[in-house]
Amino acid sequence: MNKTYIISLFTAIVSHNLVCAQTYDELWITGSAVPGGLQKLEKFPDNEFKFAGKLVDGEVKIINTEGVNENTVYLKPRYVDSNIVSNGLAYTTSTDGSDPGWVVLFDDERYKFTVNTSTRKVSGELFSPWLELYIAGGCVECGWDAGKAPALIQDENNPYIWTWTGELKNRPENVEPKRFKILGQNDWSPKSLHPYTQDEPVETSTQLMINCPDDYKWAIDKDGYYRISVDIFFQSFSCEYLGTEEPTGISSAQQESSAPVITLHGNDVIVKGNGRITVDVFNMSGLRVAGKTGQEVTISIPEKGMYIIKAAGKNGSAVRKVINTKHQKQ
């Protein structure tokens, strides 16, 4: 084999690997679709940069500098007319600012996209609030029984923020006695929240992963009561240690006994609670299809299907998935 050919082939392979392994300290977006003209992406582990927020009809250009200058590198789509909303489209790099960017078709405040510099892909979506979250783990009272996992409470003003306050402690009788994760339903799939590393200390963790292939979990280093808050839109996590004494008003038993009780009788969802309660019914697409407020609420569901029922009052809240198997008679 020709020596010159071998050297050229080796050089091409090395160059390709260097490009694939390319990393960035910062990434920014600019373009006509970016409110304010320039925004910084948040850096996450695993060579990911994320955006969550408003975009408008126009074009997004992903760059490696704070503003355009002679050192700017553009992470442009491999194909023209690539939409920022996708399951993952490849990008290439360029220094030509006239190359097309990523397409945004309409204004919305729910855009989320991720730039993965390892896979050299951009994936995006219009993110919808989740309808329920639960905490389960070896250090939780329910253990790994997802069906008994306590629910997080959704913020009344921001549907992406959820909180839970309760006791976490080393429970040797359970598997993984110091670990926990957060579920997007009272079952193990399809949605869950995780740290970016296994046994990430719960008090110092700040970012969360949606659906971790390695099933990483948070870990506690001391027994006691904790207040956990997650924002699933910005994928942020925070935890405050409250001490070994039970804080006033957050007893799990008190919460369970005062929370609304949701039952299904035929086509009717019946919700009972202590005091005035607000009940919302969502279909599995996340669309609110019914709602009512009162001391005891009955809502008729005319169509067959699966629904999420959310009930909230001043003394607690409850979430339940129900299946209506009967059409309502006209």
Image (tube, rainbow, N blue to C red):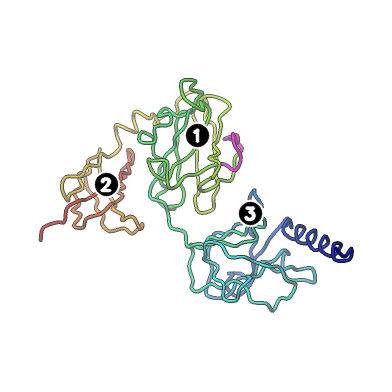
Q: Residue at x 61, y 37 (%)?
A: 204
Q: Judge the density around disc 2: few (<14), some (14-19), many (≥20) Cα neighbours within 10 Å.
A: some
Q: Is 200 above or below relative to 77?
A: above
Magenta run includes residue 203 = yes
Residue at the spot of label 3: 48
Question: Tag 3 or tag 1, which sits nearer the N-term?
Answer: 3
Label 1 environment density (alpha carbons within 10 Å; few <14, some 14–19, many ≥20): many
Asked whether, in this view, residue 289 is left or right of residue 7, the answer is: left
Q: What kind of residue is marked 3?
A: Glu
Give the Cα distance between marks 1 and 3: 24 Å
- Please state the horizontal and vertical placement of residue 207, each as a whole percent of the image: 58, 46
Q: Which mark is residue 180?
A: 1
Q: Is residue 173 magenta?
A: no
* Amino acid of disc 1: Phe
First of labels 2, 3 by sequence position: 3
Secondary element at image label 2: strand
Give the numbered dot on residue 322: 2
Mark 3 nearby-residue class (10 Å; few <14, some 14–19, many ≥20): many
Q: Position of residue 22 (x, y in %)?
A: 74, 58
- SS for tag 1? strand
Residue in the picture at 71% in, 68% down:
93
Report whether 173 appears left or right of 206.
left
- Judged by its main secondary structure, the magenta piece is loop
- Residue 252 is marked as none
